[in-house]
């Protein structure tokens, strides 16, 4: 059930464009994540990286270009986005379909050594707090000492007025970015659903969503402070934001 190179390129390029509407300074955030990973893997042969919620391979492809000697495992639950990644960014990573936080998901990755880094962008906010804590603990167990979890996402502050201020700054930045992005999330999916080459993948996607449920309910409800607390409970002693614009952060947790 593959797609052609031309089709994959078309939909990945349109994905990259529409994502500019939502991820504040998306390219800079990717660069910061790569800066962190490159720093903690300096001098290590064939570092092992895990991309959580990889979608069509956006971050994995950038990490592979920055660190061509790295081994990257990229995971997602969406078979359509994974197929686009496998076709358009085939050499960037080994792509695996899994539901992050589900029973046995970490064991299904087939990792043969500890991770140097686990990275994610706007993919963990759908997890409830208990699942998020369990996932953080599983990632801590997968990482080597000195390894990092790097999470780029929107994190609310604890209560107004700070939460209101950071959210407003983020909204205004996103509004300015929208003048350059002509397609949004919903219109991308609507248009992709009309492509006959993707029809079987959409059917499979719907089956997966029915089986695993809709993972869109949390809506970034876990605050930055709460993420930090959960990471400490999971075994990460050193946690810090390394980049912020409005409520968009890159949060880094280091395993001792």
Image: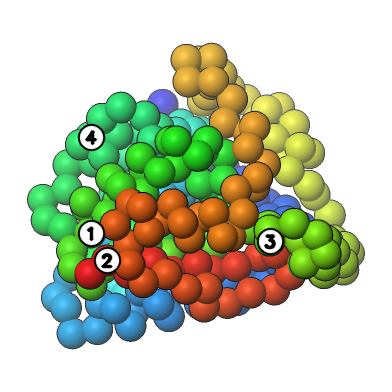
Q: Which residue is mark 1?
A: 143
The residues tagged by marks 3 and 4 sit, at their Cα atoms, a distance apart of 34 Å
Q: Is residue 6 visible?
A: no
Q: CA distance from mark 1 to mark 3?
A: 28 Å
Is 174 positioned to the left or the right of 126 in the image? right
Ranked by sequence position, the earlier of labels 3 and 4 is: 4
SS at circle 3:
loop
Disc 3 versus disc 2: nearer the observer: 3
Foreground residue among 130 and 242: 130
- Tell me where residue 182 appears, x and y as whole percent: 84, 54
* Residue depth check, mark 1 versus mark 3: number of the one nearer the observer: 3
- The circle drawn on residue 255 is 2
Mark 3: few, some, or many residues within 10 Å (few <14, many ≥20)?
Answer: many
Circle number at residue 108: 4
Residue 242 x, y percent position in the rendering: 52, 78
103 or 56, which is in the foreground?
103
Nearer the N terminus, badge 3 or badge 2?
Answer: 3
| Distance from Cα at disc 1 to Cα at disc 2 | 7 Å
Q: Can you identify the residue that label 3 sits on?
A: 157
Q: Residues within 10 Å of mark 4 (few under 14, many from 20)?
A: few
Front of the two marks 3 and 4:
3
Name the element at disc 1: strand
Tell which circle, 4 or 2, labels the residue nearer the N-terminal end. 4
Residue at coordinates 66% horizontally, 65% vertically from top-left?
A: 248
| Alpha carbon separation for disc pair 3 and 2 | 24 Å
């Amino acid at each position: 059930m593959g797609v052609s190179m031309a089709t994959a390129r078309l939909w990945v390029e349109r994905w990259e464009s529409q994502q500019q509407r939502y991820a504040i300074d998306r390219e800079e955030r990717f660069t910061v994540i790569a800066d962190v990973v490159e720093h903690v893997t300096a001098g290590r042969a064939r570092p092992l990286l895990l991309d959580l919620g990889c979608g069509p391979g956006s971050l994995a492809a950038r990490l592979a270009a920055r660190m061509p000697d790295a081994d990257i495992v990229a995971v997602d639950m969406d078979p359509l986005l994974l197929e686009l990644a496998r076709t358009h960014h085939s050499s960037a990573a080994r792509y695996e379909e899994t539901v992050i936080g589900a029973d046995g998901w970490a064991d299904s990755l087939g990792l043969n050594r500890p991770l140097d880094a686990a990275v994610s962008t706007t993919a963990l906010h759908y997890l409830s707090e208990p699942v998020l804590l369990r996932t953080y603990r599983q990632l801590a167990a997968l990482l080597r000492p000195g390894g990092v979890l790097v999470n780029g996402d929107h994190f609310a502050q604890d209560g107004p007025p700070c939460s209101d201020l950071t959210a407003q700054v983020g909204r205004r930045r996103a509004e300015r970015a929208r003048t350059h992005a002509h397609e949004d999330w919903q219109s991308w999916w609507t248009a992709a659903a009309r492509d006959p080459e993707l029809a079987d993948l959409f059917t499979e996607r719907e089956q997966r969503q029915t089986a695993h449920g809709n993972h869109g309910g949390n809506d970034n409800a876990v605050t930055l402070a709460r993420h930090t607390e959960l990471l400490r409970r999971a075994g990460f002693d050193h946690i810090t934001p390394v980049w912020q614009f409005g409520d968009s952060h890159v949060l880094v947790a280091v395993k001792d």
